[in-house]
Amino acid sequence: MHWTNFTLELVELLMWPLLVLLILGYCRQPLLALVPMLKRLRFRELEVEFDRQLRETKETADKLLPKDNTLKSRLLQTLIQDPNAAVLEAWKSVEISAKKIIATSQGEVDWDRDKPYKHLEDILTQEKLLDGDTAQVFSDIRQLRNKV
């Protein structure tokens, strides 16, 4: 094979992948702006699910829950680096608060169960420690935590 044929075949082989990479690099910012609008993204074993329900839950939670700017800023920083870790960290804060509410009204509860987070939700709803909207937000956050 002559070097010109080799060069032409190499250019032909690499042309489309390089063109795609150039377009993705050039359009990176607009494409990143579209990510929150996705409902589901699947690539091999990685699957990320975005949903309007998550947005609605956040809006309801913002109305119902007190603002903690230090927690919020810490979660936003974590969200940029690792979204799953941000969800788990947010859940940890919700779980601690829920356990405090239950301990205040019922005393000590045995948390050593198969589904402790579902049990936590059941106690909060059965004992009417949360109103309907707050209980729904709790349930949504718990389900999001389980997905992560």
Image (cartoon, rainbow, N blue to C red):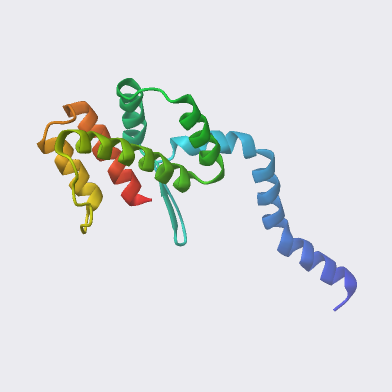
Please state if 32 lies on the left or on the right of 62 as rendered. Answer: right
Q: Among all residues in the image, which is located at the extreme bottom?
A: 1
Name the residue at 16% across, 31% down.
Answer: 129
Nearest to the observer: residue 105 or residue 66: 105
Name the foreground residue: 107 vs 113: 107
Residue 59's x, y, as percent?
35, 25
Horizontally, residue 6 falls left or right of residue 30, namely right
Location of the N terminus (image quadrant): bottom right
Extreme-left residue of the structure: 126
| Closer to the camera in the image, 44 or 55 | 55
Q: Position of residue 50 (x, y in %)?
A: 40, 41
Residue at (41, 43) in percent of width and height = 87
Instruction: Say which quarter of the image contains residue 107.
Output: top left
Where is 46 relative to 129, above or below? below
Q: Position of residue 34 (x, y in %)?
A: 51, 35
* Rendered residue at 36%/42% (across/down): 91
> Which residue is at the front of the view, 17 or 85?
85
- Which residue is pictured at 56% across the width and 44% down the height? 81
Residue 122 on image: x %, y %: 15, 43
Q: Can you name the residue that lies furthest to the top here?
A: 63
Task: Locate residue 23 relative to residue 142 in the image: left or right.
Answer: right
Look at the picture and state if 26 lies above or below 4: above
